[in-house]
Image (cartoon, helix red, strand yellow):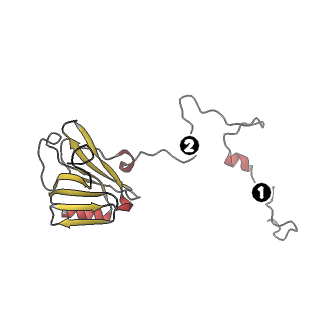
Amino acid sequence: MSDYHHPKGWEPDPNKMGNWREMFEPNRRPGGGGGTTPPQHGQPPNAASGPEREPDEAETGPPIDPAQYRPWQLQRGRSRPAMMLDLRRFEERSGLWVGWQVSYPHLIAVEYIGDKMLSLDFGVRQFMIEGEGLSELARHLQAGTVLALHEYAASIWPNGHAGPWIRSIRRLGLPEGGPQAGR
């Protein structure tokens, strides 16, 4: 054991210490050449950030299932809450999905009228959601577990819808017409 009352202060016993450079710099070339050994052929170098992981739905955006309409998608067993809420509607004329991604932490209020209308207030932006069975959506929004909202489009989901559905998603406060108006 080292003497803790050493005049220069405590110092580790060099006889009991291993080579700390080998521990922290395992790829250093022997012989003092410096640098690191190149990765094996066909192998990418390992990142210092840790093991690779699959991107989650919050990073890639939730997929849309053309077989079954779901008016909203919930996060599944993630350790961190969703940071963005994706509002999507299908533009029939262009054949493209259009929408908004808004910051969940900026959701100030959710107002509802029965289970047919919700208003989402994000401060500068406000959205009106109309449909059927939206009281369940209001509960999920309060819990912060909704990843995306999908306006129903018959051309995408020709089998129709069963249960709750979103008839329209509109951004309020914009002039009518144009792609930003919503509808």
- Please tell me whether mark 2 sits on a helix, a strand or a loop: loop
Q: Earlier in the sequence, mark 1 or mark 2?
A: 1
Residue 111 visible here: yes
The residue identified by callout 2 is 47
Residue 98 position within the rendered picture, expressed as x and y whole percent measured from the top left? 27, 43
- Where does residue 164 sit, x and y in percent of width and height? 15, 56
> Horizontal placement of 104 versus 161: left or right?
right
- Name the residue that disc number 1 marks: 16
Residue at 38 percent across and 59 percent down: it is 81
Which residue is located at x 81 percent, y 69 percent?
A: 4
How busy is the neighbourhood of tag 2: few (under 14 within 10 Å), some, or many (20 plus)?
A: few
The image shows a total of numbered marks equal to 2
- Relative side of 162 to 10, left or right: left
- Residue closest to the far front: 175
Point out the image quarter for the N terminus.
bottom right
The image quadrant of residue 91 is: top left
Q: Which mark is residue 171?
A: none
What kind of residue is marked 1?
Lys
Residue 43 lies in quadrant: top right
Name the outermost residue toward the right: 7
